[in-house]
Amino acid sequence: MRWHQAKTVMLLIFLGLNLLFAYLNFWQPLQIMSARSDDRAVLEHSLTLLAERNISILELPDPTPQRMAPLHLQRAGAAVIAQTIPDLFFSKDTQGSRLQTLSGGEIWRYNDEEQTLEIAPDGRWTYRPAMLPLVGDDAHIVSQPESNDESNFYTEQEARWEALDFLKAKNIDFSELTPSPFTTALGTIFYETSSSNIHAATPLRSDAYLFTWQQLHAGKPIFDATLSVRVLSGRIGEVSSSLAASLHEQSSHAWVSSVNDMLLRLLRDSYLLDLADAAQKQEETLMIRNLTLGYFTRFATGDTEAEIIAHPVWRVLLAEGTPIYYDAYNTRRIYP
């Protein structure tokens, strides 16, 4: 009799604990996050505080609370990529060479007089036409051209057409990718305004552009799983891919930080505040183009086909194109 009563008490205790855990893990977080995220007055107050620190945000995301889980990404590997990608650029009889890396992997290289293709051990690949100078991400940007010759300058749309025509001509499938909302103008640029405020200026024409398409999962971008094309003086300068061959979610979904949590985090981030102070000294405002929720592998690379973990992140994109990544669970800055 006592054992039967004890079992009843234990069942009631377990039921109560389950109800408590359900409240703490689901209902309470949803109510708290909804109150903080959906209250426009709270967001407006955070934006005012940021403005007082010389930071302006052009576009805010949907404040609806979300749950996310890390992704398992797997690239195909050099041996698999070498069976298909070289045929897009070279004749069937073109033979590739293999270069040993310090960590024991192999780089596959194909080249002729007109072009070069390199495939990294983990399957990332880069194609470059011959005899074209490369323009790096850290290229010097000036507001006026160094000469009066405008023949090498193109609008963003003209350069985009060149990139799209090349991808279609080479049968490079990008139909399931989403174009990045921001195009990087590299090299020498004609600006729409003569103002020294480069953050607010809009390029009219440039001699170099970088276009990027991102891989998606559940409608959210994987920021460093991309197909990118550089257009230099109206010609293709480089095409590179870091796309994953397969991906799947972990089972552990958790609530991510709200939009307002991110705004408050920006107010405490010394890196961003230093940028804002530097902009203020130039009588400029630090402009943030948008905040976007997505995935980031933290630049994980390897010499095998091993799985890579892509973590949920908030990406803060500055107006001139510099990304800053924050852990979506705790808002800790992870890059740079």
Image (spheres, rainbow, N blue to C red):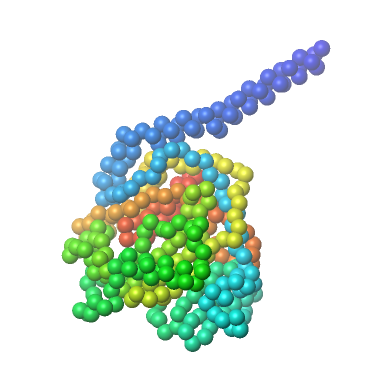
**Splitting the image into 4 quarters, where does residue 190 fall?**
bottom left
Nearer the observer, 22 or 206: 206
Nearer the observer, 138 or 242: 242
Q: Position of residue 172 (x, y in %)?
A: 51, 67
Q: Position of residue 249 (x, y in %)?
A: 60, 49
- Residue located farthest toward the top when viewing the structure as drawn: 1
Q: Residue at x 44, y 71 (%)?
A: 166
What number of labels is visible? 0
On screen, residue 201 versus residue 138, left or right, reads: left
Q: Residue at x 46, y 77 (%)?
A: 128
Nearer the observer, 14 or 251: 251
Q: Residue at x 61, y 51 (%)?
A: 248
On screen, residue 190 versus residue 182, left or right, reads: left
- Residue located farthest toward the bottom when viewing the structure as drawn: 113
Q: Position of residue 72 (x, y in %)?
A: 60, 54
Asked whether residue 303 is in view, the answer is no
Q: Residue at x 36, y 59 (%)?
A: 182
Which quarter of the rendering shows the N terminus? top right
**Splitting the image into 4 quarters, where does residue 275 fall?**
bottom left
Which quarter of the rendering shows the C terminus? bottom left
Q: Position of residue 62 (x, y in %)?
A: 40, 42
Looking at the image, is 145 positioned above or below residue 33? below
